[in-house]
Amino acid sequence: MAAFRFEVVTPERTVVQQEVEYVSLPGTDGEFGILANHAPLAAVLEIGVVEFGSRQGEREFLALGGGFAEMHGNALTVMGNSAELSYEIDVERAKAAKARAEQRLRERSEAVDFARAEAALRRALARLKAAGGNNRK
C-alpha cells in the first residue's frame, strides 16, 4: 500500500507527524477513510476516534476533540481542538469525566448546559474508545 504524510496539530502541539497508509476520521456524516493519492479535500471533523496505520502494519488511535481535515498534495493535515494518542490517555480520569457528564445530563435543571454536558460526554467516550483501541481486533 502507498503511504502519505499525516499530521495532527492542536493549538498546543503537534501530536502526529509521520508517513501512514490509511487514516479513518470522524466526519459530520460518519466515519470516512483516506488513502494515498486521495482527491483534495476539506472536511469538518466531529469529536471521535481517529485510527491510522503505518507502513509496519501497526494501528494507532487518538481521541480527537473535533476540528478540520485538509488533504492536499498527498498530505493530510488534521487541525484539532484537542487530540490525545491512545497511550497518553488517563483512563481513570476519562471514566470520571464520563460519570460527571452523565450526572449533569440526568439533572433537569436550568443551570445545566446540556450542549456542553453532551460534548463532555462525547469527548470522554472518545477518549475511552481510543485508549482501548489497541485492544480491538
Image (tube, rainbow, N blue to C red):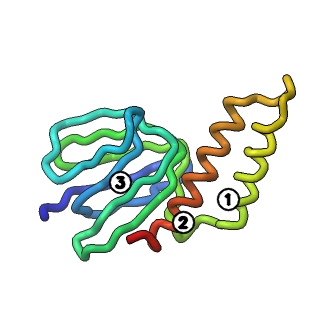
Q: Earlier in the sequence, mark 2 or mark 1?
A: 1
Which element carries disc 2, helix, strand or loop?
helix
State the separation of the CA atoms marked 2 and 1.
10 Å
Q: Amino acid at mark 2?
A: Ala
Indicate left or right for 125 with 104 as reference.
left
Q: Residues within 10 Å of mark 2 (few under 14, many from 20)?
A: many
Q: Amino acid at mark 3?
A: Glu
Q: Nearer the viewer, residue 108 or 61?
A: 108
The image shows residue 101 at horizontal and vertical percentages of 74, 45
Label annotation for residue 131: 2
Q: Which of labels 3 and 1 is toward the front?
A: 1
| Up/down of 117 relative to 53, above or below | above
State the separation of the CA atoms marked 3 and 2.
20 Å
The answer to the question of whether label 2 and label 1 lie on touching residues, with beta carbons closer than 8 A, is: yes
Which element carries disc 1, helix, strand or loop?
helix
Q: Residues within 10 Å of mark 3 (few under 14, many from 20)?
A: some
State the separation of the CA atoms marked 3 and 1.
24 Å
Q: Quadrant of residue 106?
A: top right
| Up/down of 79 relative to 137, above or below | above
Q: Amino acid at mark 1?
A: Ala
The image shows residue 3 at horizontal and vertical percentages of 18, 61
